[in-house]
Image (tube, rainbow, N blue to C red):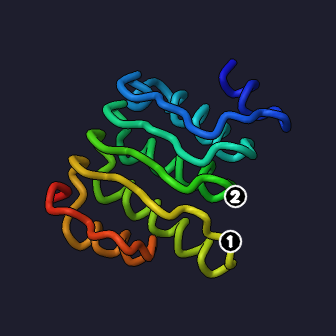
C-alpha cells in the first residue's frame, strides 16, 4: 500500500524512514522488489533511510537495477548496517556509472557503513558516486 501512495503523481513525500523493518533477505526478495518499484515510480522522494533492514547483496542488486536506475529524484540513500557486501556495492556502482554516462545521475550521498563492503569495492563506489565526502573506514 505504501507503493500506491508514493507512486501517485501528486505524492509529496520527500523523506522516507524505514529503518529496522527486515525488508531484505525474505522469500523471493519481495521487500527489495517493492522498494525498487517505489524508487522507480516516485517523483517526490529525495531521501530514503533503509538502515538495519537485513538487505543482502541480491536485495541491493534489485534496488539498484530495478529501482535506482529508473529514479530521477533520490539524492540520499542510507543503507548502513545491512549486508550489502561487494556484490551489492558493485551493482550500485554500475548503476551510478550508467547514470553518469547518460548525464542523469541525481544521487549525491550514499551511506553504506557496516555492510561488509571491501576496501576496493568501497573506493570504486565512491568514485562512481563522485562524492565530495570521504568514505569512512567503518566500511572495511
In the rendered image of this protein, does residue 98 appear above or below residue 41?
Answer: below
Q: Position of residue 127 (x, y in %)?
A: 38, 78
How many C-alpha atoms fall within 10 Å of the one at disc 1: few (<14), some, or many (≥20)? Answer: some
How many C-alpha atoms fall within 10 Å of the one at disc 2: few (<14), some, or many (≥20)? Answer: many
Q: Is residue 2 left or right of residue 137?
A: right
Residue, x 44% and y 60% (percent of image)? 109
Residue, x 41% and y 31% (percent of image)? 24
- The secondary structure type at the circle numbered 2 is loop
Residue, x 41% and y 57% (percent of image)? 110
- Give the position of the C terminus as an image quadrant: bottom left
- The secondary structure type at the circle numbered 1 is loop
Residue, x 53% and y 68% (percent of image)? 96
Q: Is residue 25 left or right of residue 92?
A: left
In the rendered image of this protein, does residue 11 appear above or below residue 83?
Answer: above
Between marks 1 and 2, how big is the CA–CA gap? Answer: 7 Å
Q: Position of residue 36 (x, y in %)?
A: 60, 42
In the rendered image of this protein, does residue 87 appear above or below residue 52?
Answer: below
Outermost residue, right side: 9
Work out whether residue 10 or residue 35 is closer to the camera in this orientation and state it: 10
- For label 1, the residue is 104
In the rendered image of this protein, does residue 4 appear above or below residue 89?
Answer: above
| Residue 89 in which image quadrant | bottom left
Outermost residue, top side: 1
Work out whether residue 138 or residue 34 is closer to the camera in this orientation and state it: 138
Q: Position of residue 16 (x, y in %)?
A: 54, 33
Q: Mark 1 and 2 residues: CB-CB less than 8 Å, in contact?
A: yes
First in sequence, mark 1 or 2: give its number.
2
Outermost residue, bottom side: 101
Q: Position of residue 130 (x, y in %)?
A: 44, 76
Residue 72 badge: 2
| Residue 1 in which image quadrant | top right
Amino acid at each position: 500500500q505504501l507503493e500506491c501512495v508514493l507512486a501517485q503523481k501528486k505524492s509529496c513525500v520527500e523523506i522516507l524512514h524505514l529503518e529496522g523493518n527486515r525488508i531484505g533477505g525474505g522469500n523471493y526478495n519481495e521487500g527489495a522488489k517493492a522498494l525498487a518499484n517505489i524508487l522507480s515510480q516516485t517523483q517526490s522522494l529525495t531521501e530514503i533511510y533503509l538502515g538495519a533492514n537485513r538487505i543482502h547483496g541480491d536485495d541491493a542488486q534489485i534496488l539498484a537495477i530495478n529501482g535506482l536506475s529508473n529514479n530521477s529524484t533520490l539524492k540520499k540513500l542510507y543503507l548502513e548496517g545491512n549486508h550489502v557486501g561487494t556484490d551489492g556495492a558493485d551493482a550500485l556502482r554500475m548503476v551510478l556509472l550508467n547514470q553518469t554516462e547518460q548525464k542523469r545521475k541525481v544521487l549525491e550521498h550514499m551511506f553504506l557503513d557496516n555492510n561488509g563492503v571491501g576496501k576496493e569495492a568501497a573506493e570504486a563506489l565512491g568514485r562512481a558516486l563522485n562524492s565530495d565526502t570521504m568514505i569512512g573506514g567503518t566500511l572495511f
